[in-house]
């Protein structure tokens, strides 16, 4: 699990540092337009959607829950904090 977490941080770090490559990859793999891939990148990568340290802001989890309701993936608001753990993250000083 710790190896996966390290790899995930490397992957999202690479994606943040290599916008054009990431947008091109997303466009090809997801079958979306360049404008769509760019818009998704601009929305998700600079903000806190992908945590840089593996810790999740409760406000972000609340927003995610609300978006799941809007997309009709959940019937009502859920407490998503029950689905995250920091057990496998590097210890903070």
Image (cartoon, grey):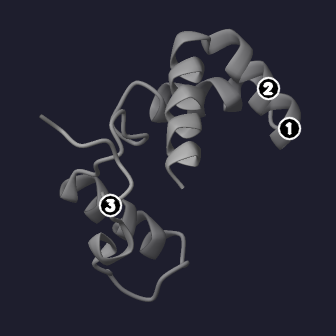
Disc 3 secondary structure class: loop
Q: Which mark is residue 4?
A: none
Residue 53, by quadrant, is top left
Task: Tell which of 35 and 44 is nearer to you.
Answer: 44
Vertical side of 87 occupied by 39: above or below: above
Q: Earlier in the sequence, mark 2 or mark 3?
A: 2
Crowd around label 1: few <14 · some 14–19 · many ≥20 (10 Å): few
- Residue located 47% across and 29% down the image: 45
- Residue located 76% across and 23% down the image: 34
Q: Earlier in the sequence, mark 3 or mark 1?
A: 1
Disc 1 secondary structure class: helix
Q: Are marks 3 and 1 in contact (CB under 8 Å)?
A: no
Vertical side of 66 occupied by 72: above or below: below
The C terminus sits in image quarter: top left
Crowd around label 2: few <14 · some 14–19 · many ≥20 (10 Å): few
Q: Which residue is labeled 1 in the image? A: 29
Q: Which residue is labeled 2 in the image? A: 25
- How far apart in space, not on screen, are marks 3 and 1 (Cα)? 32 Å
Vertical side of 68 occupied by 26: above or below: above
Residue 29, by quadrant, is top right
Q: Which mark is residue 87?
A: 3
- How far apart in space, not on screen, are marks 2 and 3 (Cα)? 31 Å
How far from the left and from the top, in percent, is residue 83? Answer: 38, 73
């Amino acid at each position: 699990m710790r190896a996966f977490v390290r790899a995930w941080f490397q992957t999202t770090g690479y994606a943040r540092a290599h916008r054009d490559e990431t947008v091109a990859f997303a466009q090809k793999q997801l079958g979306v337009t360049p404008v769509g891939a760019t818009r998704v990148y601009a929305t998700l990568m600079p903000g806190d959607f992908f945590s840089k340290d593996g810790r999740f802001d409760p406000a972000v989890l609340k927003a995610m829950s609300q978006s799941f309701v809007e997309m009709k993936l959940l019937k009502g608001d859920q407490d998503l904090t029950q689905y995250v753990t920091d057990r496998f993250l590097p210890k903070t000083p």
